[in-house]
Image (cartoon, helix red, strand yellow):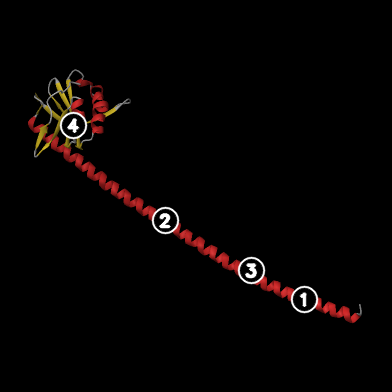
């Protein structure tokens, strides 16, 4: 190979190398641009999802706040209804001082006591010298309320209040609204059943009342 041919080949290699370098630089620029674009898109997407999560969290917080307010409103209405029912039956029983053929000297309300072993709360009691009627009051009585009163609350009364241990004791369920299934369950247990009849108290049963 002559010097001239070597020189021409060397110049060709330089030219090819410059072209390749330029091509690589162009590709590198395009790649960097694509990477920057992708990185920006990822960042924008991350920001979007971040805001989405924040918005979702904020919506959940607002929903929970509204739910708490509704629960408080419903609880307040329920408590108010319970107070209305208890006041109605307390005033009525206090006025008549008689139930199921028994006459009473005292009508008391809101008995609550706790010991280490148990506790009990009783809405109204009627007493004379030897007989007591324990009254459970609900605005609307459900069968489960009757079960809980007869099976759990009523049996504890004489334990929690030993003063009445020798008294003849009866139980009563009172409600402004008492469905038929709750009435039937109360009758099966031998409880008095009281409800509202206009401005008066109506006794729904006399038969099969059992001494507790």
- In the image shown, does 110 or 84 lie closer to the viewer? 84
First in sequence: mark 1 or mark 4?
1
Secondary structure beneath disc 3?
A: helix
Tell me the quarter of the picture where residue 123 sits: top left
Find the distance from the CA under tag 3 to the CA under tag 2: 36 Å
Secondary structure beneath disc 2?
A: helix
Question: Does 138 sit left or right of 36 as displayed?
Answer: left
First in sequence: mark 4 or mark 3?
3
Find the distance from the CA under tag 3 to the CA under tag 1: 22 Å
Q: Which residue is mark 1?
A: 16
Secondary structure beneath disc 4?
A: helix
Q: Residue placed farthest to the bottom in the image?
A: 4
Q: Is residue 112 visible?
A: no
Q: Which residue is mark 3?
A: 31
- In the image shown, does 118 or 176 lie closer to the viewer? 176
Find the distance from the CA under tag 1 to the CA under tag 2: 58 Å
Q: Dot 2: few (<14), some (14–19), or many (≥20) neighbours within 10 Å? A: few
Find the distance from the CA under tag 4 to the CA under tag 3: 82 Å
Q: Residue at x 44, y 57 (%)?
A: 54
First in sequence: mark 3 or mark 2?
3
Q: Which residue is mark 4?
A: 183
Q: Residue at x 84, y 77 (%)?
A: 10
Q: Which residue is mark 2?
A: 56
């Amino acid at each position: 190979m002559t010097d001239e041919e070597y020189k021409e080949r060397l110049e060709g290699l330089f030219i090819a190398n410059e072209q390749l370098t330029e091509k690589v630089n162009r590709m590198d620029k395009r790649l960097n641009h694509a990477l920057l674009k992708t990185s920006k898109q990822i960042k924008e997407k991350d920001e979007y999802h971040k805001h989405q999560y924040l918005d979702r969290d904020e919506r959940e917080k607002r929903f929970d706040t509204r739910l708490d307010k509704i629960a408080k409103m419903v609880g307040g209405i329920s408590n108010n209804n319970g107070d209305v029912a208890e006041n109605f039956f307390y005033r009525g029983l206090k006025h008549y001082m008689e139930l199921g053929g028994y006459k009473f000297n005292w009508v008391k309300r809101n008995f609550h006591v706790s010991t280490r072993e148990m506790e009990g709360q009783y809405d109204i009691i009627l007493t004379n010298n030897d007989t007591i009627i324990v009254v459970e009051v609900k605005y609307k009585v459900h069968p489960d309320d009757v079960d809980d009163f007869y099976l759990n609350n009523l049996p504890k009364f004489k334990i929690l209040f030993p003063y009445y241990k020798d008294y003849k004791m009866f139980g009563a369920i009172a409600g402004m609204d008492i469905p038929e299934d709750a009435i039937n369950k109360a009758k099966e247990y031998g409880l008095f059943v009281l409800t509202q009849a206009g401005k008066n108290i109506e006794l729904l049963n006399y038969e099969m009342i059992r001494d507790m």
